[in-house]
């Protein structure tokens, strides 16, 4: 009957409104307290503000381990580019020889990757880089990666200056700039890809 059909439509509208409110509340909780589901995807939220926490808040362990792998990829890419751009590079099909430069060895690459990883973890702890809101949408992902890279470079610069002072050696500013640029590119690309994979 028409009254019954109207009652069914009214109940359906109430159920739809209740479901939407639950989804919005859940999205706000997952992205670090955003008030709107779409707003959390498109705009940097309050959970990404710098705040020192101990232990740091880690909502996404996969993102944390992915950051470590990506930061080691930065060190490996830097080491490979140094070998390829060396004028004495004999070519891909030349006999394998051990590098005479200690900074080009595998051990030096692992050491540099470890130092970059420590700096990234310190910076990420301050920047809340592993909360859910850090990868909710491409804008948040790239914004968080860029901000964490900035703090990573600042931490790395302090480390390099202290190391150079202890060793009485000059600071290689070109290497520091290359590390900063490559870290920004690789980490932004990794986090953007990860954020995109969450909403497929």
Image: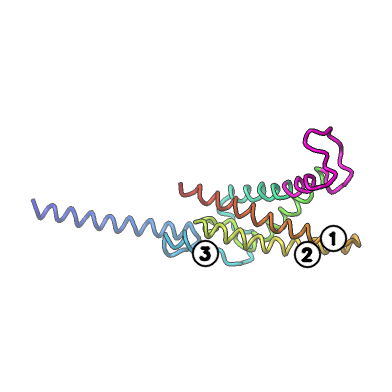
Which residues are the magenta region?
77-105
Q: Residue furthest left?
A: 1
CA distance for labels 2 and 3:
28 Å
Determine the residue positioned at 37% across, 57% down: 22
Name the residue beneath numbered marker 2. 158
Please state if 160 lies on the left or on the right of 68 as rendered: right
Label located before the other in sequence (2 or 3):
3
Name the residue beneath numbered marker 3. 44
Nearest the viewer among 76 and 96 is 96
Name the residue beneath numbered marker 1. 163
Determine the residue positioned at 55% across, 49% down: 193
For the residues bearing labels 2 and 3, Cβ distance under 8 angstroms? no
Residue 11 coordinates in the image, percent (x, y): 21, 55
Q: Tell me the SS state at disc 3.
A: loop
Determine the residue positioned at 78% across, 51% down: 112
Please state if 107 lies on the left or on the right of 4 as rendered: right
Q: How is the image coloured?
A: rainbow
Label located before the other in sequence (1 or 2):
2
Q: Tell me the SS state at disc 2.
A: helix
Magenta region's main secondary structure?
loop
Nearest the viewer among 60 and 149 is 149
Label located before the other in sequence (1 or 3):
3
Residue 146 coordinates in the image, percent (x, y): 62, 61
Please state if 26 lies on the left or on the right of 97 as rendered: left
Residue 60 coordinates in the image, percent (x, y): 56, 51
102 in magenta: yes
Q: Tell me the SS state at disc 1.
A: helix
Residue 88 coordinates in the image, percent (x, y): 85, 44
């Amino acid at each position: 009957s028409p009254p019954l059909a109207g009652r069914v439509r009214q109940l359906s509208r109430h159920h739809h409104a209740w479901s939407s409110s639950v989804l919005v509340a859940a999205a706000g909780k997952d992205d670090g307290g955003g008030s709107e589901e779409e707003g959390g995807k498109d705009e940097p939220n309050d959970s990404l503000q710098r705040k020192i926490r101990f232990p740091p808040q880690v909502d996404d362990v996969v993102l944390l381990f992915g950051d470590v792998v990506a930061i080691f990829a930065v060190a490996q890419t830097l080491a490979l580019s140094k070998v390829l751009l060396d004028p004495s590079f004999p070519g891909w099909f030349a006999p394998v020889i051990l590098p005479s430069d200690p900074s080009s060895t595998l051990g030096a690459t692992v050491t540099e990757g470890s130092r970059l990883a420590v700096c990234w973890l310190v910076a990420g702890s301050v920047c809340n880089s592993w909360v859910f809101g850090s990868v909710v949408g491409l804008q948040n992902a790239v914004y968080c990666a860029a901000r964490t890279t900035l703090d990573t470079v600042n931490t790395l610069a302090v480390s390099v200056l202290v190391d150079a002072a202890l060793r009485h050696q000059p600071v290689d500013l070109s290497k520091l700039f290359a590390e900063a640029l490559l870290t920004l590119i690789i980490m932004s690309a990794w986090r953007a890809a990860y954020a995109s994979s969450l909403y497929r």
